[in-house]
Image: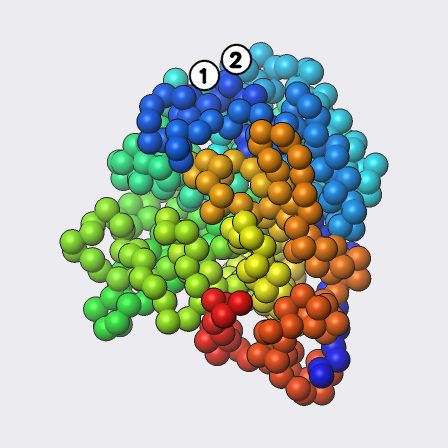
């Protein structure tokens, strides 16, 4: 048996990530509540968030923070809900700000570093009525909102995430129509992407004006792609989609020029507004030209020969993709990097332990290539409403279950594994033997201690078949 320890750097942050609308409950003044209640087909089985995980009225965040502390987490990423803090333009709710200040204090009391996200998909209704992020006035509104939040929370918060997944928000809301307001317009999509980049830049400077030493970043969703055969025909589609989803925003942050297919926006204020970069990573998709399926934008799902598929609305689960995205983001930004989201939908908790092991092996390998990875935030702490997928049981990402009717929680076995990793700041051969014994020899063949762990390059390791568990 191989005897090994994969140690992570001293001071590494271990945590989970959550989003306000998904866990708080009772958010009735934002675009997502309006979307959930405005018509059939917007959300799985026409469900509504309702009480969600009862983090607001019932303050169950306290017991869930206890669960995170029990897992020996030393950090937690959460978002603030704009519509609670600023229910009408220019009108701020001090009680809501105090609630979030109490959340920060609760994390500090449990020795957890708060990472606060300022925009995570939801907008106040008053902003939506003005056109939301299609209207450049949203940038100024966001800047003022951010300044007020930093004023209220800043004493105990030094890690800020301005915007979560700008490309996902823009494309899902204005290109595919899966998020509110359900539009399908390329011009609007481009305008929203540019305004989100402007919003990030404005928020960055608003934070720095009050906290010069704050660390400010952005959470970027990266997708892995593989080219359909014949590659000569399909490779151009791959290049277009990779640039659009993975690289355009990063280019805008580095150069002040947002280069999108057939259109370039000058956003000079965005240049040099990045202290760290966040990586959200979940799936891989096959890419190619499909003239009969233009609505799929070059992405068409097909059952892979390797890996497994998630629910039919998502793609192939390929944890090794983390390595390539960490390396690329680190190389081009030259900034510290946090894994701000990573996880797998797995209600039975049969896949999650192996997914976690393979993901963290990819992170560990990247660190050993000198990538400046500073922390890992697992998505997510407790099962919650998964946006347009609602409470579909196929989209349960939590390390703990959460019954939305009774609010009862239960720890999944993967939470035990994550807790052991966080406690030791390492993943060990003993953990592998106990949690993923059937995959141990494939993951860690019998070689000298740490000689070649995790052994194969990511390109070779993609041949592992996760559907064998």
Whether residue 405 can be seen here = yes
- Sequence-wise first label, 1 or 2: 2
Numbered badge on residue 88: 2
Residue 444 vertical placement versus 109 (above, below): below
x and y, in percent, of residue 239 in the image: 32, 62
Sort mark 1 into few (<14), some (14-19) or many (20+) by Cα contacts within 10 Å: some
Q: Give the colour scheme shown.
A: rainbow
Residue at 65% x, 24% y is: 56
Give the residue furthest to the left: 292
* Disc 1 from disc 2: Cα separation: 6 Å
Residue at 67% x, 66% y is: 435
Pick the residue in front: 388 or 330.
388
Q: Which residue is mark 1?
A: 126
Kind of element beneath mark 1: helix
Residue at 56% x, 37% y is: 384
Sort mark 2 into few (<14), some (14-19) or many (20+) by Cα contacts within 10 Å: some
Pick the residue in front: 148 or 74.
74
**In contact (CB < 8 Å): disc 1 and disc 2:** yes
Give the residue furthest to the bottom: 447
Numbered badge on residue 95: none
Whether residue 279 can be seen here = no
Residue at 27% x, 36% y is: 184
Q: Is residue 431 left or right of residue 198?
A: right
Q: Is residue 60 left or right of residue 268?
A: right
Residue 44 vertical placement versus 25 (above, below): below
Residue 28 vertical placement versus 423 (above, below): above
x and y, in percent, of residue 1 in the image: 71, 83
Q: Is residue 247 left or right of residue 325?
A: left
Pick the residue in front: 83 or 316.
316
């Amino acid at each position: 048996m191989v005897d090994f320890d994969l140690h992570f750097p001293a001071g590494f942050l271990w945590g989970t990530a959550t989003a306000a609308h998904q866990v708080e409950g009772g958010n009735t003044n934002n675009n997502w509540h309006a979307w959930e209640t405005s018509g059939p087909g917007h959300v799985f089985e026409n469900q509504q968030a309702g009480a969600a995980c009862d983090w607001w009225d019932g303050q169950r965040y306290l017991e869930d923070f206890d669960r995170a502390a029990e897992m020996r987490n030393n950090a937690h990423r959460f978002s603030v809900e704009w519509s609670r803090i600023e229910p009408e333009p220019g009108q701020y709710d001090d009680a809501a700000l105090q609630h979030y200040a109490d959340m920060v204090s609760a994390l500090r009391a449990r020795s957890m570093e708060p990472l606060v996200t300022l925009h995570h998909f939801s907008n106040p209704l008053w902003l939506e009525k003005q056109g939301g992020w299609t209207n450049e006035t949203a940038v100024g509104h966001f800047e003022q909102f951010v300044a007020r939040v930093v004023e209220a929370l800043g004493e105990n918060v030094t890690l800020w995430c301005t915007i979560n997944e700008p490309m996902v928000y823009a494309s899902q809301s204005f290109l595919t129509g899966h998020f509110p307001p359900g539009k399908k317009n390329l011009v609007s999509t481009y305008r929203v992407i540019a305004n989100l980049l402007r919003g990030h830049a404005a928020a960055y400077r608003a934070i720095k004006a009050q906290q010069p030493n704050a660390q400010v970043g952005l959470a970027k969703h990266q997708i892995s792609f593989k080219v359909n055969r014949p590659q000569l025909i399909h490779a151009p589609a791959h290049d277009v989609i990779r640039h659009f989803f993975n690289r355009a925003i990063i280019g805008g942050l580095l150069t002040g020029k947002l280069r999108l297919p057939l259109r370039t926006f000058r956003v000079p204020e965005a240049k040099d507004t990045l202290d760290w970069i966040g990586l959200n990573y979940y799936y891989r998709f096959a890419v190619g030209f499909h003239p009969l399926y233009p609505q799929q934008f070059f992405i068409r799902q097909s059952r892979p020969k390797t890996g497994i598929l998630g629910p039919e609305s998502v793609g192939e689960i390929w944890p090794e993709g983390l390595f390539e995205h960490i390396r690329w983001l680190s190389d081009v930004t030259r900034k510290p990097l946090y894994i701000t989201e990573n996880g797998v939908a797995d209600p039975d908790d049969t896949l999650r332990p192996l997914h976690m092991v393979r993901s963290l092996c990819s992170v560990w390998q990247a660190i050993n290539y000198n990538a400046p990875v500073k922390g890992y935030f697992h998505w997510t702490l407790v099962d919650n409403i998964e946006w347009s997928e609602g409470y579909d049981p196929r989209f349960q990402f939590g390390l703990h279950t959460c019954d939305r009717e009774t609010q009862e929680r239960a720890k999944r076995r993967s939470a035990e594994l994550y807790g052991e990793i966080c406690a030791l700041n390492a993943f060990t051969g003993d953990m592998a033997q106990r949690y993923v014994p059937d995959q141990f020899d494939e993951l860690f063949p019998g070689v000298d201690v740490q000689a070649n762990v995790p052994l194969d390059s990511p390109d070779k390791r993609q041949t592992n078949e996760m559907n064998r568990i």
